[in-house]
């Protein structure tokens, strides 16, 4: 069996995620002894051995929804978002005198990858109508933050949960400002293998979250588990390629 929680598992909070998984495993009564961190995401998400994984909304709605079983969606208590929903923050350098997205027409946009809801689809839908002089692929939200802070890009879209974590753990976040937030969409769902009963896994996750100590709860920013229907994920728009 495989358990992998790689979406919000930056090195600084891996010990808290390890304890979170152990709490889930204890309540479930079975599962791998530890989280996997070195597996291919796409192969893992679709593996018949997947007990618990987490994917992004865009991969789920475009390629996975009929190949996996939805367990539920973690709620991070984000302001201005319904439970279980999240959004992207659009960030620029703090020293940049431009303050609105429209001011950044003709600039360089950094993104983590083109199958990301929070780094690609959500920001591009929100910024539709803008043209960019350059599109900068980075491979990760943290790397997008660095690209903007270091002047290799002018704006980027960052997952709001990741932004909170980076503000706590990455000194370069202090060099950026939030110029806008996208419309909330369903958050990153927990999934299991197709055909596996999700109910006991959901119950174990909910109980584990409720029993987290305060230090780990603050570290992970997690508040609970909610049910968001597949139809709600499928209704999120996927933008056309951005003009350059």
Image: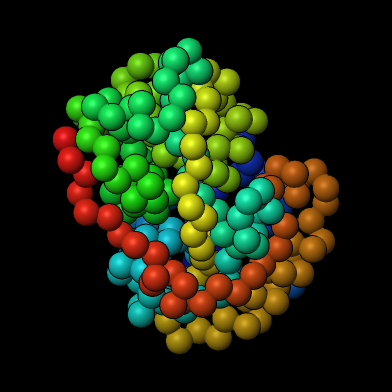
- Give the residue drawn at x 27%, y 55%: 239
> Where's the C terminus, which quadrant?
top left
Q: In which quarter of the image is residue 205?
A: bottom right
Q: Residue extending furthest left?
A: 244
Quick check: 119 above or below 71?
A: above
Residue appearing at x 51%, y 63% in the figure: 186
Against 147, is 34 above or below? below
The answer to whether residue 227 shows anywhere in this view is: yes
Q: Which residue is drawn at 72% across and 57% down?
A: 223
Q: Where is residue 15 in the image (x, y as percent from the top left)?
A: 66, 44
Residue occupying image coordinates x 20% and y 27%: 133
Up-down: is 118 above or below 101? below
Give the camera-side residue of 233 and 67: 233
Vertical side of 174 occupied by 242: above or below? below
In the image, 51: left or right of 123? right
Q: How many labels does the image show?
A: 0
Decide which of 55, 181 is in the foreground and name it.
181
Q: What percent of the width, then of the height, locates residue 128?
A: 29, 45
Name the one closer to the observer, 231 or 59.
231
Quadrant in the picture for residue 43: bottom left
Give percent across and percent down for residue 196.
50, 84
Residue 23 spot, x, y in % from top left: 73, 62
Visual colour scheme: rainbow
Residue 142 appears anywhere in the view: no
Q: In this view, does 70 lie to the left or right of 104?
A: right
Please indicate whether residue 124 sits to the left or right of residue 206 in the image: left
């Amino acid at each position: 069996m495989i358990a992998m929680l790689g979406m919000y598992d930056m090195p600084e909070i891996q010990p808290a995620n390890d304890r979170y998984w152990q709490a889930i495993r204890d309540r479930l009564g079975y599962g791998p002894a530890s989280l996997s961190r070195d597996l291919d995401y796409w192969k893992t998400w679709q593996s018949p051995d997947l007990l618990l994984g987490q994917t992004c909304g865009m991969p789920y709605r475009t390629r996975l929804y009929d190949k996996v079983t939805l367990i539920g969606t973690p709620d991070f208590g984000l302001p201005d978002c319904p439970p279980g929903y999240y959004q992207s923050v659009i960030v620029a350098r703090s020293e940049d005198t431009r303050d609105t997205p429209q001011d950044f027409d003709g600039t360089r946009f950094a993104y983590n990858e083109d199958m990301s809801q929070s780094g690609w689809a959500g920001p591009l839908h929100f910024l539709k109508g803008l043209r960019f002089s350059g599109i900068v692929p980075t491979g990760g939200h943290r790397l997008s933050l660095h690209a903007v802070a270091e002047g290799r890009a002018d704006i980027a879209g960052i997952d709001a949960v990741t932004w909170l974590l980076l503000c706590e753990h990455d000194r370069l976040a202090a060099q950026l400002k939030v110029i806008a937030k996208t419309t909330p969409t369903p958050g990153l769902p927990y999934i299991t293998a197709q055909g596996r009963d999700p109910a006991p896994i959901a119950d174990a996750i909910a109980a584990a979250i409720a029993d987290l100590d305060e230090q780990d709860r603050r570290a992970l920013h997690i508040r609970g588990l909610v049910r968001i229907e597949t139809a709600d994920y499928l209704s999120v728009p996927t933008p056309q390629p951005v003009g350059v």
